Image (cartoon, rainbow, N blue to C red):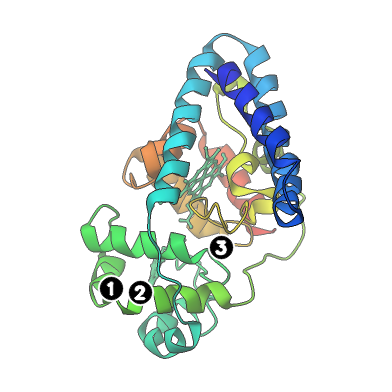
Amino acid sequence: MAIEVQPAYFRCLYNLKFQPSSIKNNYKWIRQNLLERVVNLRVLIDWKNDVFLFKKIIAVGLAQILLFTATMGFAQGNPVAGREKSQLCQGCHGEFGISTTPLIPKLAGQYRQYIEKQIRNYQAGTRSHQIMNQAAATVSEDDLPDIAAYFERQHRMEGDGSDDNSVGKNIFLRGEATKLVFACVNCHGIKGKGLHPNISMFPVIGGQHSDYIRKQLIDFRSGFRTNSPNGIMNTIAQYLTDAEIDALADYVSKQ
Ligand code: HEC
Ligand code: HEC
């Protein structure tokens, strides 16, 4: 499956090479990011046969996520209006989206589409949290894009810059091929800062509170949180031990 996908990537890159400069910049981005990923995948494929099955799950998952992103319509949103409309939210998430409470996530610089999706999931009950289910219920369809745009516009969340957790860093960058854990960097980007605004389904996690990251990974692993597209994060988290989750939360939060 993965190997069949690869020529398509290269064809796509080849075609893009002969487009006007605006698309060429895109080409540069795609080459830097996707090629890295393809190489990464090939390393995994060489590992052992089991990985084939895992690769297939991931490839199907990714295709679905990208399709999902492409087909979802998002209104632009007005960040100035959003500042006013997000007073309630700011009470917990901080005036500029930098919450100071470990289990309340930072929203500063988070992709607006991701914020919107989470609010819709809390409204629909496909993501559960007593407080957020209630808070989300107060948000109207009209206000949501403005509120999301306000938080996205803030100076992006960041940690203290140290990255000394070698266990966490290693899983983040290379994954754990023996246990079929796919490297986080493939989807969450370098230092967890996201891939690209056009691929906004993969949230920014670099610089997020470590306690919050730990809780989400535990919730994905236990199946309490099931709202990631195609259950992709459940698949990944189920192979992580407590110690690995701690190490990842520590590494990611410092970025
Ligand atoms: C009383 C405190 C409180 C209020 C008010 C509140 N939140 Fe939250 N919010 C939380 C907590 C706690 C979580 C983590 C929930 C979880 O673990 O699922 C959260 C999670 C979220 C998330 C998920 C973030 C992520 O990274 O996945 C979003 C988005 C969000 N809140 C947006 C909002 C918006 C928009 C408002 C205003 C309408 C709001 N919140 C009001 C406490 C609050
Ligand atoms: C194949 C893509 C993919 C890989 C690889 C991946 N993730 Fe994710 N991750 C996602 C997606 C998609 C979401 C958003 C889920 C949603 O829409 O609710 C997510 C969400 C998360 C969240 C919740 C963020 C929040 O603000 O609530 C955390 C934490 C996370 N991932 C950590 C990791 C870690 C750590 C790894 C590596 C062990 C990893 N992810 C690997 C796709 C991926």
Question: Which residue is found at the position 52% from the left and 34% from the top?
Answer: 241
Q: Is mark 2 within 8 Å of ligand 1?
A: yes
Dot 3 lies on which element?
A: loop
Residue assigned mark 3? 209
Image vertical order of residue 107 relative to residue 40, above or below: below
Cβ of mark 1 under 8 Å from ligand 1: the answer is no
* Left or right for 91, reference 59: left
User: What residue does disc 2 label?
Assistant: 144
Residue type, mark 3 in image: His
Which numbered disc covers residue 141? 1
Q: Disc 3, ligand 2: is the CB inside 8 Å?
A: no
Badges 2 and 1: C-beta atoms under 8 Å apart? yes
Q: Residues within 10 Å of mark 3 (few under 14, many from 20)?
A: many
**The one of 242 and 5 positioned closer to us in this rendering:** 5
**Residue 198: which quarter of the image?**
bottom right
Which mark sits nearer the N-terminus, 3 or 1? Answer: 1
Q: Amino acid at mark 1?
A: Glu
Mark 2 packing: few (<14 Cα in 10 Å), some, or many (20+)? many
In the image shown, does 75 or 253 lie closer to the viewer? 75
Badge 1: few (under 14), some or many (20 or more) residues near its Cα, within 10 Å?
few
